[in-house]
Amino acid sequence: MGFALDFLIKLCPGGRPYYKEILATFGNSIISYLRLSETSGATAADTSGNGRTATYTNVSLANTTHLGSPAPLLVPASAPGINWYSASLAAAFDPAELALMGWAKVSGAGVWTDGAQRDIAYLRADANNYVEIKKRTNNNQFQFEYRAGGVTNSVIIAWASTDWFHWAITVSKLNDRMRAYINGAMVGVEQNGLGVWLGALGATNVNLGTIGAGLMLWDGWMSNVVLLDREATGDEL
């Protein structure tokens, strides 16, 4: 709680709620913003007002509190997932200029050494065009991956935090760069030589907590996931 509170104070010096800070910082650049703060039902609201909601499957809602609002728990045995696809989101998604970010926490230290791939976010057109944030099968490794036109740009870091952490990936084809961030600081090396994305997001391939079909399941909590139609700056993150 102290870790999250420290970030809340830093990001919201005026004391306004975290979600209002997100809206003020990114404004019309937000494609969709899922606070994941629901206490019941199957719909994850889009706090941006764009109506690009998501659908919960087998998720334990309001299991804890993070940044002043409820946050859900995803337990692999229940085959959980959050389907974020909509035709509106797919139409607004710009694979050449984007930022994808959110908060996550594992259910326990053993998750980092359980030998399983566990995805936080997966936005895919096909096997050659996708954005993926995941815990790797290798012990204590976390990966940010952007693949466009069959060209892979990836940042892999050593990571085994049991606290809430903020993750983010930013992409700009115009600036020919992909960057990865943890808790607001860039990690790894800026990736260049980006490919050209081909194809639209698939209806079953825009997910949080899974790659779909009950596979690569996240084990822990998540909250405040944001998709932008532009690269976010380091200062914003």
Image (spheres, grey):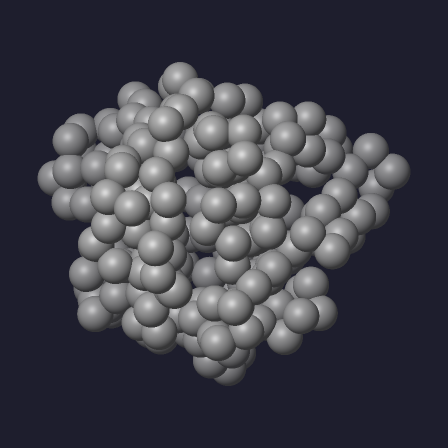
Residue 234: x and y in percent read: 62, 26
Quarter of the picture holding the C terminus = top right
Horizontal placement of 63 versus 145: left or right?
Answer: right
Where residue 172 sits: x, y (%)? 52, 36
Task: Give coordinates of residue 43: x percent, y percent.
Answer: 51, 78
Foreground: 173 or 179?
A: 173
Q: Residue furthest bottom?
A: 41
Q: Position of residue 103 (x, y in %)?
A: 50, 44
Residue furthest out toward the right: 14
Query: Between residues 19 and 33, which one lies in front from this camera angle?
Result: 33
In terms of image quadrants, where is residue 108? top left
Residue 1, quarter of the rendered image: top right
Where, by quadrant of the figure, is residue 190 drawn? top left
Evaluate whether residue 108 shows in this view. no
Please tell me which residue is depicted at 52% across the width and 68% down the height of the picture.
91
Vertical comparison of 103 with 163: above or below: below
Seen in the picture, residue 115 relative to 52 is either above or below; the reply is above
* Residue at the left extreme, as displayed: 115
Number of numbered discs overlaid on the protein picture = 0
Identify the residue at horizontal 24%, vertical 28% (top origin): 140
Which is more toward the observer, 159 or 229? 229
Q: Residue furthest top?
A: 189
- Residue 233 visible in this rendered orientation of the protein: yes
Q: Residue at x 38, y 64 (%)?
A: 200
Closest to the observer, 208 or 62: 208
- Horizontally, residue 141 falls left or right of residue 163, namely left
Q: Residue at x 73, y 34 (%)?
A: 11
